[in-house]
Image (spheres, rainbow, N blue to C red):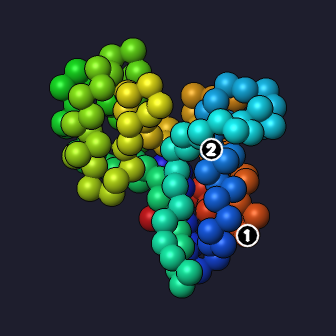
Amino acid sequence: MKRVYVNEKWCLACHLCEYNCAFANSGLSDMAKLRGVKISPRIRVEGDERISYAVSCRHCTDPQCVKSCITGALSVADGAVRIDRSRCVGCLTCVLACPYGCVAPGADGLATKCELCLNNSAGAPACVAGCPNGAIVYEERG
């Protein structure tokens, strides 16, 4: 299955992946409408002046977040860990269970995470398309 991978040697810490992610998942038709709005990207840039890297869901083969979900809102479909937000009650146990810190509370208090842009109009991860340095790739690895 294809996944998002990051080469930290190429990451500029420009945060464009975050903006592209937030826009792709916002439902807005124009990125300029994000101006002044607190964005909620499903990917985030971590690091310091020496090294930086983007962190997003790893779509684990044995996801602890899915096992911890008390309502069954998290599941695995075609190798991707997905959230059924209509079933999420906002207990955020999945946030605690994710060993990589990739599940986070959304602006509405419900869990949110990278779903590889499968649910939005981008069709492919917007963070990959928006990375100016090619540090983020969407590919299958052995």
Query: Vertically, is 9 above or below 14?
Result: below
User: In which quadrant of the rendered view does residue 50 lie?
Assistant: bottom right
Residue 6 vs residue 53, the one in the foreground: 53
Which residue corresponds to mark 1? 133
Give the residue type at disc 1. Answer: Asn
Query: Vertically, is 20 above or below 52?
Result: above
Residue in view at x 47 percent, y 31 percent: 107
| Residue 78 in view in this figure | no
Residue 68 position in % (x across, y down): 19, 36
Give the residue type at disc 2. Answer: Cys
In the picture, measured across the screen, residue 91 lies left or right of residue 113, that is: left
Residue 2 position in % (x across, y down): 53, 51
Residue in view at x 25 percent, y 23 percent: 72
Residue in view at x 32 percent, y 30 percent: 74
User: In which quadrant of the rendered view does residue 71 lie?
Assistant: top left
Which residue corresponds to mark 2? 21
- Is tag 1's residue or tag 2's residue first in the polypeptide sequence? 2
Residue in view at x 57 percent, y 28 percent: 119
